[in-house]
Image (cartoon, rainbow, N blue to C red):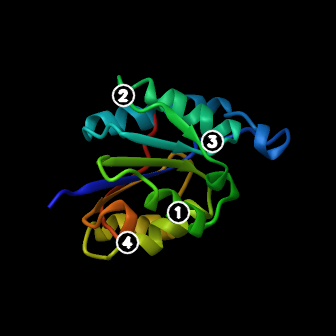
Amino acid sequence: MTTRRLVLVRHAKAAQEGADRDRRLARRGTTEAPAIGRWLAEQQIAPDRAVVSPARRARETWTLAAAELGPTAEPELDERVYRNTVEDLLAVIRETPAALSTLAIIGHNPAIQDLAIAFDDRDGDADGRRQLVEKYPTSAVAVFAVADPWAAASTGTLVSFAVPRS
C-alpha cells in the first residue's frame, strides 16, 4: 500500500493594508516563509504538487518556502483555495493525479484549519491535534499520511503539526 502525504500550509504573516487578494507578506512573513521550506526539507518532504491560492501573500509564502526545498513542483494557482471552503479544498485533493505522492495546499484560514480538523482520523499526533484545534497560526504546517487514493481521500493520520519560525 502506498502512503500519500497531504501538507496543509497557512500562508505566512501578511501586511494589513491593501485589497485582500493583493496583500503582501509583512516583514515578519518574509522571514517566516523560508522557515516553512527549511522545516519541510528537514522532514524530507518535497511536494510533487503544490496548489496555491492566487492571493499574493500565499504565492509569496510558497515562493520563499519552495526556494529552501531545492527542486520541487511548480505552483498551481487555484481559485478554489482562495475561496476558502473545506469542500473546495477536498475537491483539489481528490483531483490530484494518482501517481503523485505528496500534495501541498497553501491557503488561508478558516478553511485550512477546518480541513485539518475534519480530515484528521485521530490516530496520529494527539499533541499536534490539540495545537491545531486551538490555533492554526500563520506559517503553520500540518502533515497527514493518507492511505486512500487521492480520488477517495477523506481522512488521514496527522503525522506532525509545526509552526516553523526563523
Question: How far apart are the alpha carbons under marks 1 and 3?
Answer: 26 Å
Tag 2 residue: 69
Choose mark 2 or mark 1, whichever is in front: 1
Q: Residue 155 is drawn in which quadrant?
A: bottom left
88 lies left or right of 129: right
Question: How far apart are the alpha carbons under marks 4 and 1?
Answer: 17 Å
Q: Judge whether residue 145 can be spotted in this image.
A: yes
Question: How far apart are the alpha carbons under marks 2 and 1?
Answer: 26 Å
Please report whichever mark, 2 or 4, sits nearer to the chain's N-terminal start. 2
Residue type at numbered disc 4:
Asp
The answer to whether mark 3 and mark 4 are in CB contact below 8 A is no
Toward the viewer: 3 or 14?
3
Q: Mark 1 packing: few (<14 Cα in 10 Å), some, or many (20+)? A: some
Tag 1 residue: 91
Residue type at numbered disc 1:
Ala
What SS does tag 2 mark?
A: loop
Choose mark 4 or mark 1, whichever is in front: 1
The answer to whether mark 2 and mark 3 are in CB contact below 8 A is no
Please report whichever mark, 4 or 1, sits nearer to the chain's N-terminal start. 1
Residue at left offset 46%, top offset 66%: 116
Residue 55 percent across, percent down from the top left: 70, 42
Residue 25 percent across, percent down from the top left: 67, 34
Please report whichever mark, 1 or 3, sits nearer to the chain's N-terminal start. 3
Assign the N terminus to one quadrant of the image.
Answer: bottom left
85 lies left or right of 152: right
